[in-house]
Amino acid sequence: KLDNTLEDLRRSGAKVSAVVGDASLAADAARFVEALRRYEAGAAQGLSFDGALGLTPRQSKRGWWTVEARQRRDVKIRALRVLRFAGLTEAAAAVAIVRVARAHPELFGDYPAPRSVRHVIRILARAGAETP
């Protein structure tokens, strides 16, 4: 089954590279095919596919999955601010968002819900004028 999967990836990468007319998509496909070649060459020595793709975090850096989970959580926090607490001051909205987070942490997805008003204020400040 694994051989079929690798063969499917090889075939898919080659097809996309050959068919794509958009230069940036063709370049993306070429990078994928090259990563697959690096993986095939280095797997026996311990290279993972995410390593071949360049997705493994460097030492003391957060993984892409953690960064994206935090971004999704922060979008939800900003959406709450705009959609539910727009009439409140920033500090009052942050208090309300923390209350929601404590009552319903599952709403914030796979990254920990904010635990403090100061944390929510920092998240809102990072967004600046950018709102969902």
Image (tube, rainbow, N blue to C red):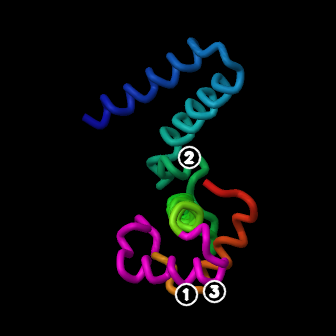
Callout 3–callout 1 Cβ contact below 8 Å:
yes
Query: Does the magenta segment cover residue 53?
Result: no
- Residue type at mark 2 is Ala
Residue 73, position in %: x, y? 51, 65
Image quarter of the C terminus? bottom right
For label 1, the residue is 116
Please state if 27 lies on the left or on the right of 1 as rendered: right
For label 2, the residue is 52
Q: Which residues are magenta?
A: 85-112
Residue at 57% of width from left, 53% of height from top? 55
Residue 128, position in %: x, y? 75, 65
Residue 100, position in %: x, y? 43, 77
Residue 124, position in %: x, y? 66, 71
Image quarter of the N terminus? top left
Of circles 3 and 2, the one toward us is: 3
Cα gap from disc 3 to disc 2, whole angstroms? 39 Å
Residue at 40% of width from left, 83% of height from top? 102
Quarter assignment of residue 56: bottom right
Asked if 82 appears above or below 22 in the picture, the reply is below
- Residue type at mark 1 is Ser
Residue at 56% of width from left, 30% of height from top? 33
For label 3, the residue is 118
Query: Does the magenta segment cover residue 106?
Result: yes
- Label 1 element class: loop
Mark 2 crowd level (few <14, some 14–19, many ≥20, 10 Å Cα): many
Residue at 63% of width from left, 86% of height from top? 118
Quarter assignment of residue 58: bottom right
Please state if 2 lies on the left or on the right of 24 as rendered: left
Whichever of labels 3 and 2 marks the residue nearer the N terminus, that label is 2
- Label 3 element class: helix
Q: Which is nearer the eye, 65 or 102? A: 102
